[in-house]
Image (cartoon, rainbow, N blue to C red):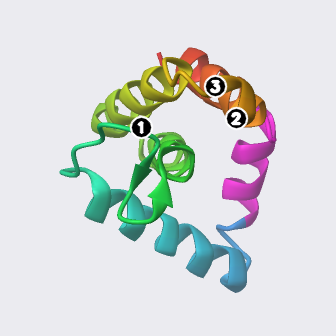
Amino acid sequence: YAGKERYEEVLKLAETDEVLKERVASILEFADSSLNLTFTNNKTSGVGAAEHCEAFYIAYLKTGDEKYAKKAEELALLIANDPEWNEKAYFLGTSFDMLVLST
């Protein structure tokens, strides 16, 4: 798990590092392609809500666009309300952090 400062540090490095720049671009594409998905549980199209939540959070930090923060919040709440949350304790903690940081 990485805190806001670590994400921001990596995004800054991505400004000059081509490999990181490509990875950030890939994450933004993933976030954009996922914005219109409807999440009803912790899995959508074989990719977990936590992975989507992280991508939306990174996209929000990179762009400042509230649409990503809102989607990260939606997924963080979905994960937090998952009845099997104890099996996903790591993602629950990460999602809670992302929820707090994105609001």
Q: How many marks?
A: 3
> Badge 2, how many Cα within 10 Å: few under 14, some, many 20+?
some
> Badge 1, how many Cα within 10 Å: few under 14, some, many 20+?
few
Q: In the depicted view, which residue is nearer to us: 32 or 96?
A: 96
- Distance (Cα) linking label 1 and label 3: 29 Å
Indicate the amino acid at tag 1: Gly
Label annotation for residue 36: none
Using residue 37 as the reference point, say whether residue 1 is left or right of it. right
Picture layout, residue 30 above or below residue 70: below
Residue position marked by numbered label 1 in the rendering: 64
Q: In the depicted view, which residue is nearer to us: 7 or 75?
A: 75
Q: In the depicted view, which residue is nearer to us: 47 or 20?
A: 47
For image coordinates 50% across by 27% down, the residue present is 76
| Span colored in magenta | 1-13
For image coordinates 56% across by 44% down, the residue present is 50
Work out which quarter of the rendered image holds the N terminus and state it.
Answer: top right
Asked where in the image residue 88 lies, by quadrant, the reply is top right
For image coordinates 49% across by 74% down, the residue present is 26
Indicate the amino acid at tag 2: Lys
Q: Earlier in the sequence, mark 1 or mark 3?
A: 1
Residue 14 in view here: yes
Q: Nearer the viewer, mark 1 or mark 2?
A: 2
Residue 47 position, x and y percent, is 48, 61
Q: Are marks 1 and 2 in contact (CB under 8 Å)?
A: no
Asked where in the image residue 86 lies, by quadrant, the reply is top right
Tell whether position 2 is magenta: yes
Label 3, secondary structure: give it. helix
Label annotation for residue 85: 3
Residue 4 in view here: no
Label 2, secondary structure: give it. helix
Q: Are marks 2 and 3 in contact (CB under 8 Å)?
A: yes
